[in-house]
Amino acid sequence: MKINRITISALLLCATFLYSAAQETGSILIKNGTVITITNGTLENTDVLIEEGKISQIGANLDAGDARVVDAEGMYVMPGIIDAHSHIGLEVVNEASDPNTAMVAVGDAINPLDVSIYRALAGGVTTSHAMHGSANAIGGQCQTIKHRWGDYNPNHYKMEGAPRTIKFALGENPMRVHGENNGIIPKTRMGVEQVFRYYFSEAVKYQDKWENYNGENANAVPPKYDLRLQTMVDILNGDILIHCHSYRADEIMMLMNVLKDFGVEKICFQHVNEGFKIAPELAAFGASASVFADWWDYKFEVYYSTAYNAAILTKNGVTTSINSDSGELIRHLYHEAGKTQKYGGLSDDEALALITINPAKQLGIEERVGSIEEGKDGDIAIFNHHPLSIYAIPQMTIVDGVVRFDIDGDADDMRISIDPEEKFPALYEGSEAEVNCLQDTEFEQVHNH
């Protein structure tokens, strides 16, 4: 059999499918709430029925059938919040060993026990974009995750079917890590540009080699497979979405020019603090922007920004989201969205779109999440007040029809309780006495260190 890139991809896909069991889904009827659909207005005294993880009906006096019933009278029901820039569920996020580490993927190292996932749920966040760091001009591949807290299988956190994404970075970070610390390109902002141009050019040559090979006879010797260059090819072909750490307007314009030269159309600029300076240009390119609400001036290249950034970008037709980039800020993204009403006068739907449907579009998952519509995933956040109110507190967060956070039902705000006296004999071979002895020895070793 002639081996090519399609065969390799198919084998990897099959391996992933076999390793992953079915995700847990649930059925639940949310009754009598004020439903903020985001895309179809706000509906008073309305029910939302989720069956087997999908929103099946939206209306009044719906029949629950066998589904659990939650009375949301006097409460506000909105789609689960989406964070387009996060690092929760990860440990060390930078593979800083080379200016291009496109071959690594954070999705291979999701930590299902990271308590930040639960804390995000307590803020109504059901989906986040777990990102590689910004040490490299071309960083590693990122992972869109569902917050399925309580599931110990890290594979189950990956949002099945979500497009692949990758982290790029402009400016000070790759310059410092590689040029200043290691004396290699890039040491300047000019060098950052050349890293992009060099590897895109190498990817074009690599793709040509494979196309020539696939067009030859079956006895031809295949080119050497290179995961880093193949990832770059996938970017060129539009199969991977770029999410680029950025601050300065001049550098953002530079990268858009590079992408034009190589025919790349899909990019979301992250942070993009000076995006308000070039909002029309971003809109014309088709780029999107994921920004902080009012966070800047923490280093020199982020000296100049404005709290009106999100509103200016939105009014210029740029698909804009507000992100956290923080395990703490992720808990109150709804407050961050509300700031755009003071700084820019956005409507309720415009402000809430910044943390729902817009980040969904930036991640390529808007057909699944980001609004309350029939057929979409049953990802819901329920608030005791309007989510843009300073008095709003999330009461319940639902992922795929499964309640993952319940302010009244969760014991001590934790769904996973660790009992230090609990034994796990199934993890070891031997008698119960041997297991107990082994566990005691391990405890002493950890304690002594």
Image (spheres, rainbow, N blue to C red):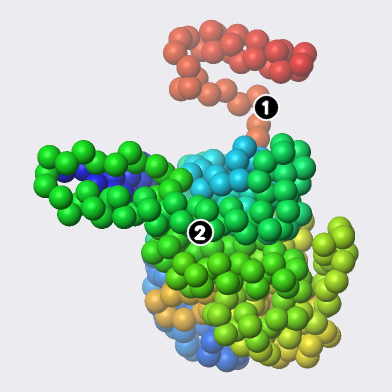
In the displayed structure, does residue 343 sit left or right of residue 111?
right
Q: Is residue 347 above or below residue 118?
A: below
In the picture, the disc for residue 420 is 1
**In 3D space, how far apart are the residues under numbered discs 2 and 1 (Cα atoms)?**
39 Å
In the displayed structure, does residue 58 sit left or right of residue 189?
left
Q: Residue at x 58, y 72 (%)?
A: 257
Q: Give residue 106's position: percent from left, percent from top.
A: 54, 46
Instruction: Name the element at disc 2.
Output: strand
In the picture, the disc for residue 165 is 2
Type of the residue with mark 2: Thr
Image quadrant where residue 204 sits: bottom left
Q: Residue at x 72, y 71 (%)?
A: 250
- Report whether residue 366 is seen: yes
Q: Residue at x 68, y 58 (%)?
A: 190
Q: Give residue 208's position: percent from left, percent from top.
A: 31, 55
In the picture, the disc for residue 11 is none
Type of the residue with mark 1: Pro
In the displayed structure, does residue 30 sit left or right of residue 162?
right
